[in-house]
Amino acid sequence: MPSHFRFAGFELHIASRSLLLAGAPVAIEPKVFDVLSYLVEQRERAVGRDELIAAVWGRVDVADATLQQAISRLRRVLRETPDVPFVRTVPRHGYQWVAPTQLLTEPSPEQRAEPMMRASAQAAAVPAALPRERATSPGIKSRWLVAALAGLVVFAGAILARLGLYNGDTRGNAAATQKAASPVARIPMAADASATATSPPCAAEMSAASCIERLSSHLSDPALASASRVPLLLQRAQEYLRTGGLAAATADLDTLDSQLDAATPPALTARMLYLRHRAAVLGSHPDQALGFAQRALAIYRQQGPSDAHAELLQSLGTAASRQGELDRALTWLDSALEMYLATKNEAGAIRTLASKAYTLSQLGRFADALTAARDAEQRAHGGASPDLQREALSALAWASIQNGRLSDAREAVHAALALPVADTNSAQSPSLHALLGFIDAAGGRFQEALSAWEAALSHTPEGSSTSTAAGLHLAVIYAALNLGDRAQAQTQYQQLRAMAARQPELTQSAEHAAALLAHAKGDDAQAAAHFAQVWAAARESGTLNQQMLADYADVLLRRNDLNTLETLLGEPALPAREGHLYQLVQARYLAHRGRRADAQAAFDRARALAGERYTRWLEVTRREIAAAPGTR
């Protein structure tokens, strides 16, 4: 492929993905760079819109308006004027590069043909049933909501986690998704060699119900020795937890307490403590869960690496991530991954990598999150079960959204939806459709996002955590306000407020919704009061995020409360300072302070980080910078 072009004082380096002007780097968004590269490569002819969309986005279900926006931004980057044209619009067809261009690395004829072949192949790979996006977005009642919804994916992971995409629960049962931290793996247990004969491990393909039935049959034998009964009870408790049978599992574990003694092998004692830990997690007893885990770890550390040890580390890591203890979570997950790799447990490694991708995203380490998710997907693609493949693809989709790669995210979700789903995996379909909603939202397709979230709400398995529904209600409120449907937003808010009255831990979501509604009605004083409560609670729980900052910042800017906004931007507990929303908020703050050059620099960083997440908020920020006082 050509690697170096020169035109009108610019230098375009394809290999290093850089654009220079007079030797200095030029800020350019990734997709805009791709449009530029493709047009320059194919400068000898006019390129059709569909071909250009397929080459740059890898799909054809992208709105023409999205391409038009990219072309407009490209012209601005190149400072195009009528006297110095770069891109010619070809009516009813597409675009052609027209600037005199010097090719410094000559491609072969085969290389010159490669981009067009790649675009044709990508276009052909898109299912014909996929509808084209509308060329225009729905009417927007409030400009601030556009940006808010585009950044809504920041808290999407919490919703998807509760729906079963990030907890490692490959069965997706309702109870397990309540507060799941990691899966309960099927690990055969035997007290000693003699017990193995009477402790039949359940085969991997055996359903939990069949396994429980088999174990119960053996346990009903009055002649069964105590030494053989212990591993059977442990295995049955394990299967109950895999299917959400918390009460039955607890009963078996209570029975075990009376049968374990000093002669019990340490491995069985540690496993019992681990299952106690898992039961406490599912029963919402975090202090008890941590106590059981610490006792189990003390035993496992003496025995060296094992799948059971790694499973406990993964559970601790995922639970810590849910609680906002992200650095600790990453330490646990790294230890679990190292151990799974040492024991060659690919399934455990895949689940841990998916959890690690989610945690890294929360920390704002989006590129690292994408690397972890890709590793999980590549490992799963090599022959893992459909559930594991789905879990890895979901992590990849989530990380792709965070990196502004919406086309890649949508492709991953559709691949996950195409996989077979077990009858016991009822949570997976709504969670994947919820994820599609966040992709649509980030791309400005608000009606599609609303439909996806409403469908996810209606199909959320009965018995799932109400925090799942609370998060989806909040998402629907965002979409409804963007579509100007304040009545629906109010209805969703009333339902969310009723849920919070029953479960105080949902108060933060309800306050966030109240702030959004107050802001939409123009009552910024009330909105600021609600957001202050939300921010304080999130700081306490370790769940501050860019979305919350962006929502709160818009209220403060309308009130010209720059001192409070400055405090928020300097909040030590706020992760993801390199995220595009943080950079946009910083740009707006700097513009209002009259620091136009610094505001422009932050804005350029935001544009580069946004990827395909282009929203009108970018235009709003650009106008605010242009109107800002201070030296140009």
Image (cartoon, rainbow, N blue to C red):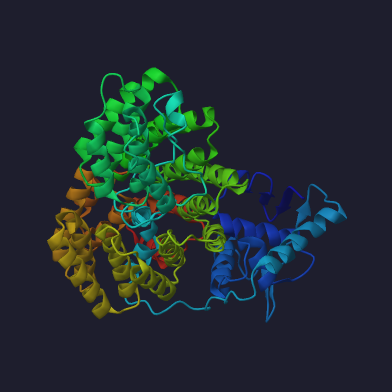
Residue 578 visible (yes or no): no
Residue 191 visible (yes or no): yes
Q: Is residue 312 above or below residue 357?
A: above
Q: Whole-percent x and y of residue 164?
A: 39, 54
Q: In the visual, does 551 lie left or right of 48?
A: left
Q: Whole-percent x and y of residue 502?
A: 14, 61
Residue closest to the eye, 269 or 565: 269
Give the residue drawn at x 35%, y 42%.
236
Q: Is residue 99 above or below residue 270?
A: below
Q: Is residue 401 above or below residue 252?
A: below
Residue closest to the eye, 408 or 198: 198
Q: In the visual, does 260 lie left or right of 168?
A: left
Q: Residue furthest front?
A: 223
Give the residue drawn at x 24%, y 66%.
516
Total numbered labels: 0
Q: Based on the displayed image, in which of its 4 quarters is residue 302 positioned?
A: top left
Give the residue drawn at x 35%, y 40%.
221
Q: Whole-percent x and y of residue 56?
A: 63, 61
- If the image is split into quadrants, where does the C terminus sit? bottom left
Q: In the visual, does 486 lie left or right of 412?
A: left
Q: Based on the displayed image, in which of its 4 quarters is residue 143 positioned?
A: bottom left
